[in-house]
Image: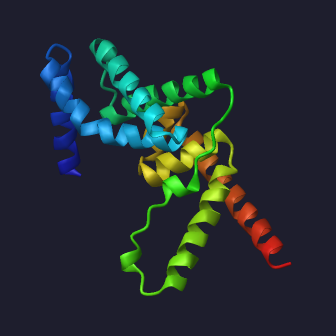
Amino acid sequence: MQEDKIELTEEVVLINAAKTDPEAFGLLYERYVDRIYNYIYFRVGCAGDAEDLTARVFFKALRSIGSYRHMGLPFSAWLYRIAHNQVANFHRDRSKMQEISIENLVVEDSSRYSSLEHLIETKQENAFLLGLVNDLSPQKRELIILKYVQKLSNEEIGQIFGKTEGAIKSLYHRTLVELKEHAKQHQDIRNL
């Protein structure tokens, strides 16, 4: 816990420096660009669009960093909020939600499997799970990505969604219940 406080204090110093020093902002960029890109990529499903939107996020962050106020949350929560808004604008402009291809999400190293059957079974399980996630509403799908892919806390997700931590816990619970029900329905259909 003490280590987290030291890391947060160092981050605050770096953020304050970045308000006047482009090199300090460059360090923040290097620290977070991969995480923001991955988050956006999972939301838009296209590397080119994800690269463009990631650039927009950091351009907006650079323009707005002077007004950034540390509120006790990691700087990444602010960046994810900007990314969330950029992705929402992207989808609104496109007016059609793009499905994420399962093939692009699951990259397996086949050398770690002892048998072809095990590899096929694992790919089928991953495809099944990703299909369930893709069937969720955009907000619930984003929640799953932030929680399990980006490994953010409920508090950080709340900041991104503009909701309280309690509201995120409730949404998370409802999402898991929905996933469980859909999994059971699909399993029942498979058993027919």
Residue 163: x %, y % from top left: 55, 33
Seen at 53% across and 74% down, the residue is 122
* Residue 67 in view: no
* Residue 61 in view: yes
Apparent side of residue 156 relative to residue 169 in the rendered image (left or right): left
Most distant residue in the bottom direction: 114
Apparent side of residue 71 relative to residue 166 in the rendered image (left or right): left
Apparent side of residue 154 relative to residue 169 in the rendered image (left or right): left
Task: Name the colour scheme.
Answer: rainbow
Position above or below: 6 against 151: above
Residue 12: x %, y % from top left: 21, 29
Position above or below: 44 against 181: above
Q: Tell me the quarter of the picture where residue 176 sits.
A: bottom right
Seen at 60% across and 71% down, the residue is 124
Residue 111: x %, y % from top left: 36, 77
Screen quadrant of the C terminus = bottom right
Position above or below: 141 against 190: above
Seen at 51% across and 48% down, the residue is 145
Most distant residue in the right direction: 192
Q: Tell me the quarter of the picture where residue 108 sits.
A: bottom left
Q: Nearer the viewer, residue 7 or 97?
A: 97
Residue 22: x %, y % from top left: 16, 18
Q: How many marks?
A: 0
Q: Nearer the viewer, residue 74 or 28?
A: 28
Seen at 45% across and 52% down, the residue is 149
